[in-house]
Image (cartoon, helix red, strand yellow):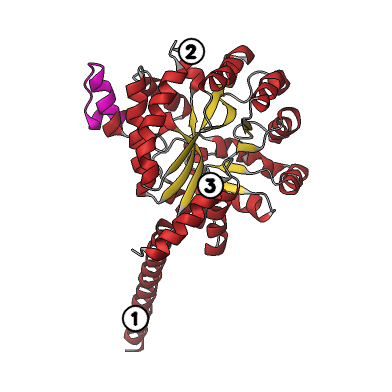
Amino acid sequence: MADLQSVVRASQFCALAVQQTLANLLNFHMAADRFRQNIASLPKAELHLHLEGSIQPTTVCALTRSHGVVFTEAEVRQKYAYQDFNEFLEVFKWVTSFLREPRDYALITNDLCEQLLSQGVVYAEVTLSIGIMILRKQVPEANFEAMLEAAEPFHKRGLRMNFVFDAVRQFGVEAAMQVVQAAERANSKSIVAFGIGGDELAIPTRDFRGVYDKAGEIGLHRLMHAGEIGGPEKIREAIELLGAERIGHGISAAQDPALMDLLADRRIPLEICPQSNIRTGALSGQLRRKNARIEDHPLPKLARHGIPVVLSTDDPAMFHTTLLDEYENARRMGLSETELTGLIQASFDHAFDPAARFVNSLSHQTQKTNPQ
């Protein structure tokens, strides 16, 4: 009889433990849902976003169809299910091969604007692969004019968009200078910065000094992808040799306390794109660990050191993410709600257009006047 009572008590204990576990899981998911709703309701800005990496499968189908090639949405989604970084690069090349005329760029700009508004984004600085356009013998100014026309109606709907003209590092110094010259010819206040992406291990940083000097002369701010797959020395070079004002990615800074001090003291922001760092294997490479997880990301360490951090998506369609997803990722890293709302504010504070802060203020006033 005593044995039977022991079995009953043990069963009751197990049942209670299961109930408590389920209750904890339910509370966790309810908290996550509340958090997502809160973040979704706030005006947001995004500062590291590649137009060509934002093309959704439905838009890819429209693009290919306009050039006489038919793909189903399922086929495009299958292509987007790449297994490693090299496959991602092949998909990127394939998708962008259908960006051939100004109307193609207008189409994807319209699509991106709709995506951003649906997430409560009211300000964005969108990176354009001008170096790719030049390589493909296109006229960047014509493509850019089509983008401006496509984006203009969205201004009335509450989205302000500016642009970054981007060169590809491994294409070389002369090609990078051609991107700056294209920005000069376009002569638009909507072009707020010049940047360089691509393989950060290709071509010494110092070789691009003249290019960045020219960008500064024509009034452009200076960006650089650094510390994504490269070490912290790449970040320091970008700052000290090129005068970079914001750093794309910069996750390797966490390895160098002196560099973290420099970034914090000079208030140089890092444009952190967590899902991108997972998908490309950059985080695993920096940590020298296979299958790194979002929870392993150094974002909390960097932000709590006093370094300005702006949260972004990089190539959202191709990395299967959204800005709301990235804030959820940051929450999973252990950031508090106060820290997360601080990240939202930082994206406005460190925008290159001073009007971004006005846009944020105006959006808050509109929310108060017209509550959901």
Asked if residue 318 is positioned above or below residue 97 in the image, the reply reads below
Question: How many numbered marks appear?
Answer: 3
Furthest residue in direction top, as rendered: 137
Residues at badges 3 and 2 in contact (C-beta under 8 Å)? no
Asked if residue 302 is positioned above or below residue 99 in the image, the reply reads below
Image point (44%, 35%), residue name: 315
Residue highlighted by disc 2: 135
Question: What amino acid is found at the position of numbered circle 3 in the picture?
Answer: Ala
Marks 1 and 3 sit apart, C-alpha to C-alpha, by 58 Å
Label 3 secondary element: helix
Furthest residue in direction bottom, as rendered: 1
What mark, if any, has residue 261 been given in the picture?
none
What mark, if any, has residue 12 been given in the picture?
1
Residue highlighted by disc 3: 356
Furthest residue in direction right, as rendered: 258
Span shown in magenta? 60-78
| In this rendering, the label closer to the viewer, 3 or 2 | 3
Image coordinates of residue 83 in percent, x first then y, are 41, 31
Label 1 secondary element: helix
Question: What amino acid is found at the position of numbered circle 2 in the picture?
Answer: Leu
Q: Earlier in the sequence, mark 2 or mark 1?
A: 1
Marks 2 and 1 sit apart, C-alpha to C-alpha, by 70 Å
Marks 3 and 2 sit apart, C-alpha to C-alpha, by 32 Å
Image coordinates of residue 33 in percent, x first then y, are 37, 62
> Is residue 83 visible to us here?
no
User: What secondary structure characterizes most of the magenta part?
Assistant: helix
Let me know if residue 302 is in the magenta part.
no
Label 2 secondary element: helix
- Badge 3, how many Cα within 10 Å: few under 14, some, many 20+? many
Let me know if residue 61 is in the magenta part.
yes
Question: What amino acid is found at the position of numbered circle 1 in the picture?
Answer: Gln
